Image: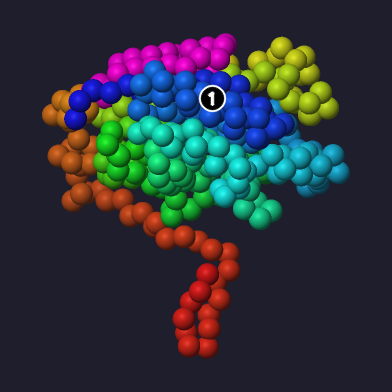
Amino acid sequence: MNPFKVAVVQAESIPTDSMACAEKAARLVREAIEQDAKVIVFPEAFLGGYPKGNSFGAPVGMRTPAGRDAYAAYHEQAIALDGKEVALIAEAVAHSDAFVVIGCIEADGGTLYCTALFFHGSSGLVAKHRKLMPTAGERLVWGFGDGSTMPVVDTPYGRIGAVICWENYMPMLRMYMYGKGVALYCAPTADDRDTWLPSMRHIALEGRCYVLSACQYLRRGAYPEDMECALGDAPETVLLRGGSAIVDPLGQVLAGPEFNREAVLYATVDPRQIIRGKFDFDVAGHYARPDVFRLAVDTRPKAALTCISGAGDEEA
């Protein structure tokens, strides 16, 4: 496989208007495709928004009416997988051979999920990953994914998977990705701290894979004035400062980290570097010790409702 270009998009979402945000994402996708990017990664919760600083009025043991209103407003901006926002992204990718990973807030009934969507050329939406473990206060507004949505997708550019934000600190999930042969490890995130890049470099070295990490550049002014925000109400206050980066299989930073502005970062991926890296360390191959350590992964969907008919047949 010949070298090719990849991109990570560090942009500010439009959390109050999911269609306008999808239009912005589609424009950025087209621009990256014009720059010959074959794989394009967007941040966590880009469509639907990352409500940083909002407690949704939920001190321990109580919920406020204002917090319920805040959740209802958040739910209104979440997307459906058969909705117009998804169709718009699919259209932007359709006339290319590009592969796009984009974070969204997905509505499924009354529950919201932090989800990464996978799009590929004319095939449109080909897979999704729901965040397995929302972090801290995220658990108040996001449901938990299960093992049925942990895809590693075969593409002309290698196997592509996505691990969202602090899921990257889950060693067993990383090992699952390595065991599935991930070559382009996508890490949409809302972590803009200085400690994030060292983690991405560690993962690239550990998995001997390319890591593409995208974080938003997000200001307080993107949200309404009356939204609760523990970081303050000045419109220019930066809620997420970015820090997006691209790292090669030996831990070298090829692009970024970029802070405090919107940007699209590009780098060239050489698939041969993955094999060169695995010469001395293949964590799911010659460096594994299955006689000592083995990982069991349950990839079955976990439905809340299973109907059992008189014949004993199960139906979700």
Q: Quadrant of residue 68?
A: top right
Query: Of all residues shown, which one is farthest toward the front?
Result: 95
Near-viewer residue (99 or 231) = 99
Would you say residue 194 sits in the magenta stretch?
no
From the viewer's perspective, tell me whether residue 154 is left or right of residue 88.
left
How many numbered marks appear? Answer: 1
In the structure shown, which secondary structural element does the residue marked by tag 1 occupy?
A: helix
Where residue 42 appears, as percent x and y from the top left, is 49, 28
Where residue 35 appears, as percent x and y from the top left, is 39, 18
Q: Residue at x 49, y 33 (%)?
A: 92
Tell me which segment is drawn in magenta. Answer: 242-270
**Dot 1 alpha-carbon crowd within 10 angstroms: few under 14, some 14 to 19, many 20 or more:** some
From the viewer's perspective, tell me whether residue 182 is left or right of residue 34.
left
The quadrant the N terminus occupies is top left
Where residue 203 appears, as percent x and y from the top left, is 34, 29
Would you say residue 248 sits in the magenta stretch?
yes
Q: Quadrant of residue 75?
A: top right
Colouring scheme, one of rainbow, by chain, secondary structure, one colour:
rainbow
Is residue 32 visible from the viewing direction of this image? yes
Q: Is residue 167 above or below residue 145?
A: above
Q: Residue at x 73, y 19 (%)?
A: 221
Near-viewer residue (156 or 145) = 156
Residue with the mark numbered 1: 27
Q: Is residue 219 above or below residue 211?
A: above
The kind of residue on which mark 1 rests is Arg
Q: Residue at x 47, y 84 (%)?
A: 312
Where residue 306 appears, as percent x and y from the top left, is 54, 72
Is residue 196 visible from the viewing direction of this image? no
From the viewer's perspective, tell me whether residue 212 is left or right of residue 16.
left
Q: Quadrant of residue 168?
A: top left
Q: Residue at x 56, y 76 (%)?
A: 307
Query: Of all residues shown, which one is farthest toward the bottom?
Result: 310
